[in-house]
C-alpha cells in the first residue's frame, strides 16, 4: 500500500483553509452580499417573537378583578383593547369658485370690485356663504343659494374703509385676495396696494405771447413718484379756468411729456373774452401739483406755415436709445408781413419740442431743436412703429417732414409668477420613513468581496461557500483513499 500521507494531509488542510477563507470573506467584506440572508433570518426571528407575544397576550385573562356579589352585569372583554382613531370628516363643500375677475393694483382710498363664478357641483340645491378675503382676513361675505349644477357670477363691491376696518391700517405692498367657499378653497390673485399719490409737474414750456389768429402749444412733463403704473388727469388752465384736459398713464418712477395745442378761441370758450395787450396766468396742473407762468395777448402778425420757404432741413434718419441729436431748419420769409410764431418739432404727430421765432420779410432764419432719445419716447409713447415721420410744424401745418427709424429698446424678459390659489385644508399624512443611505464604499481601494467574487460583484452566500469547502474536502478524502488502494 503506497499511500502518500503528505499529499492527503495537504489536500485536507487546503480544504479547511478554503472554508476558513470563505467564512472570513463573508464576515469581513461580504456584508452587502449577505444582506438578503441576514434580513430573511431577522424577519423569521421577528415573526417568531411576535407569534409568541400574541400567544402570551391571548393567554392572559382580560380582567383579573372579581365582580361584586350584587352585580348583575357581566363585563365582556373587548376583542381589541387598542382604541381606533376616527378619520377626519370629509370636505362636504360642493360650491366651487373659479374665474376670478379682479384688479391687480389698488390705490389707497379706492374701492375694490371683485367678481367670481360659483358652481354648485351637487345633485341637489344648496346654500353656502362665500367670503371675499384679503391677506387672509375676511372682509365681506355673501350667502348664495344655487340649484343642482347651477353656476352664477357673484360680485363683491368693497369700500376701502371696509378693508381698513378688517385689516387695520393698510400699508403699501402686495397682498393675496380672492373669493373662498366654506371649506376655504377658492380663486385668488395678487393685489398691489399703492399710496394715494398723484403726478408731479416737472417742467412747463409755453410761449410768453399769443395772438388771436394763431394756435400755440404748451408742453409739460409729469412724473409718477410711485412704483406702479397710474393714470391721472392733467389739465391746462388759463386765468384759473380749465381749458383742456388729458388722461395720462405713466409707469412707476417714470415721466411723460404732455402737449396741449390751444387757440384763444378755446380759451375764450372757457373764460370768456380776452383782451389784447393783456397779461394772464396760465399753466398745467395735476392733483395738487402745478407749474405755469404768464402769457400776454398781442396783436401779432400771422403765423402761417405758407409764409416760410424751406432752404435746408438737417435731421437724422436713424435714432437709437441714448442718442442726442439736433434738428436744424433754415427758412426764408416769402410773405408780405413779418412772421412771428411758434415752431414745433413733432415725431409721429406728437410735439417733442418748441421754439418761438420771428422772421422779418425777406430774411432767413435757422431754427434749431436739440432732442434726446428720451424726449422722443416721453412724447410719442408708445411709438407706433420703428419707422416714423418727424419734422417741423407751425401749429398743425407741416413746414418740412421726413421719415426716420426709431429703434425701440428691447424689453428684458420677465417671468410671470404663478397666480396664487386658495386650497382647502387637508389632514397632514404621517411622515414616511426614509431608508438609510448606503454609505459603504465599493471602490477598488476598499473592495473585499471574497475569493470567488470580482470586485464590485455580488458576493457568494455563506451557505454556498460552505458547500464548496465540503465538496473540496470530499475530493481530498476520495483522493487519499485512492492512494491507499495502490
Image (spheres, rainbow, N blue to C red):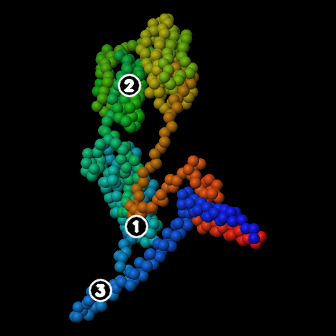
Q: Residue at x 32, y 44 (%)?
A: 110
* SS type, badge 2: strand
In the rendered image, the vertical position of residue 278 relative to residue 163, given as above or below: above
For the question of whether residue 371 can be seen, the reply is yes
- Residue 334 placement (x, y as % from top left): 51, 9
Q: Residue at x 25, y 48 (%)?
A: 168
In this rendering, which labeled residue sits more in front, label 1 or label 2? Answer: 1
Residue named by callout 2: 220
* SS type, badge 3: loop
Task: Point out the tag, 1 or 2, that comes first from the N-terminus.
Answer: 1
Task: Point out the tag, 3 or 1, that comes first from the N-terminus.
Answer: 3
Q: Quadrant of residue 475?
A: bottom right
For the question of whether residue 118 can be seen, the reply is no
- Residue 403 placement (x, y as % from top left): 57, 22
Residue named by callout 1: 91
52 left or right of 316 in image: left
Mark 3 → mark 1, Cα distance in angstroms? 45 Å
**The one of 417 and 29 positioned closer to us in this rendering:** 29
* SS type, badge 1: loop
401 left or right of 182 in image: right
322 left or right of 461 in image: left
Q: Residue at x 60, y 57 (%)?
A: 450
Residue named by callout 3: 64
**The one of 119 and 331 positioned closer to us in this rendering:** 119
**The one of 83 and 189 positioned closer to us in this rendering:** 83
- Residue 223 placement (x, y as % from top left): 37, 29
In this rendering, which labeled residue sits more in front, label 3 or label 1? Answer: 3
Amino acid at each position: 500500500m503506497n499511500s502518500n500521507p503528505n499529499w492527503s494531509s495537504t489536500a485536507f488542510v487546503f480544504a479547511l483553509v478554503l472554508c476558513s477563507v470563505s467564512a472570513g470573506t463573508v464576515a469581513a467584506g461580504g456584508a452587502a452580499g449577505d444582506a438578503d440572508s441576514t434580513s430573511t433570518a431577522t424577519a423569521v426571528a421577528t415573526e417568531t417573537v411576535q407569534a409568541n407575544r400574541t400567544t402570551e397576550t391571548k393567554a392572559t385573562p382580560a380582567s383579573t378583578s372579581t365582580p361584586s356579589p350584587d352585580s348583575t352585569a357581566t363585563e365582556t372583554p373587548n376583542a381589541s383593547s387598542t382604541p381606533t382613531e376616527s378619520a377626519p370628516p370629509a370636505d362636504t363643500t360642493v360650491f366651487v369658485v373659479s374665474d376670478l375677475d379682479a384688479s391687480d393694483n389698488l390705490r389707497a382710498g379706492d374701492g375694490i370690485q371683485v367678481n367670481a363664478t360659483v358652481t354648485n357641483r351637487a345633485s341637489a340645491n344648496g346654500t353656502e356663504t362665500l367670503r371675499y378675503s384679503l391677506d387672509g382676513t375676511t372682509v365681506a361675505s355673501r350667502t348664495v343659494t344655487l340649484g343642482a349644477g347651477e353656476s352664477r357670477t357673484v360680485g363683491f363691491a368693497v369700500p376701502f374703509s371696509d378693508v381698513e376696518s378688517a385689516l387695520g391700517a393698510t400699508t403699501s405692498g402686495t397682498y393675496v385676495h380672492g373669493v373662498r367657499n366654506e371649506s376655504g378653497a377658492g380663486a385668488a390673485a395678487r393685489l398691489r396696494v399703492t399710496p394715494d399719490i398723484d403726478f408731479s409737474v416737472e417742467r412747463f414750456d409755453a410761449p410768453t405771447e399769443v395772438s388771436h389768429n394763431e394756435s400755440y402749444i404748451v408742453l409739460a412733463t409729469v412724473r409718477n413718484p410711485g412704483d406702479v403704473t397710474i393714470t391721472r388727469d392733467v389739465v391746462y388752465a388759463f386765468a384759473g379756468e380749465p381749458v383742456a384736459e388729458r388722461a395720462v398713464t405713466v409707469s412707476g418712477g417714470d415721466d411723460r411729456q404732455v402737449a396741449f395745442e390751444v387757440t384763444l378761441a378755446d380759451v375764450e370758450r372757457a373764460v370768456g373774452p380776452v383782451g389784447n395787450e393783456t397779461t394772464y396766468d396760465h399753466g398745467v396742473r395735476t392733483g395738487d401739483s402745478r407749474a405755469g407762468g404768464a402769457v400776454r395777448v398781442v396783436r401779432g402778425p400771422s403765423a402761417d406755415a405758407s409764409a416760410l420757404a424751406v432752404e435746408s432741413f438737417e435731421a437724422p434718419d436713424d435714432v437709437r436709445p441714448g442718442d442726442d441729436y439736433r434738428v436744424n431748419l433754415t427758412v426764408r420769409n416769402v410773405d408780405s408781413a413779418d412772421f412771428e410764431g411758434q415752431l414745433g418739432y413733432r415725431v409721429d404727430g406728437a410735439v417733442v419740442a418748441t421754439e418761438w421765432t420771428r422772421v422779418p420779410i425777406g430774411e432767413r432764419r435757422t431754427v434749431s431743436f436739440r432732442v434726446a432719445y428720451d424726449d422722443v419716447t416721453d412724447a410719442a409713447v408708445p411709438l407706433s412703429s420703428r419707422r416714423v415721420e418727424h419734422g417741423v410744424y407751425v401749429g398743425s401745418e407741416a413746414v418740412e417732414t421726413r421719415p426716420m427709424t426709431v429703434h425701440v429698446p428691447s424689453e428684458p424678459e420677465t417671468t410671470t409668477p404663478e397666480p396664487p390659489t386658495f386650497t382647502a385644508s387637508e389632514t397632514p399624512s404621517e411622515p414616511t420613513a426614509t431608508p438609510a443611505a448606503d454609505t459603504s464604499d465599493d471602490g477598488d481601494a476598499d473592495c473585499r468581496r471574497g475569493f470567488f467574487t470580482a470586485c464590485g460583484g455580488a458576493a457568494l452566500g455563506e451557505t454556498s461557500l460552505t458547500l464548496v469547502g465540503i465538496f473540496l474536502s470530499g475530493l481530498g478524502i476520495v483522493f487519499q483513499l485512492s492512494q491507499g488502494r495502490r
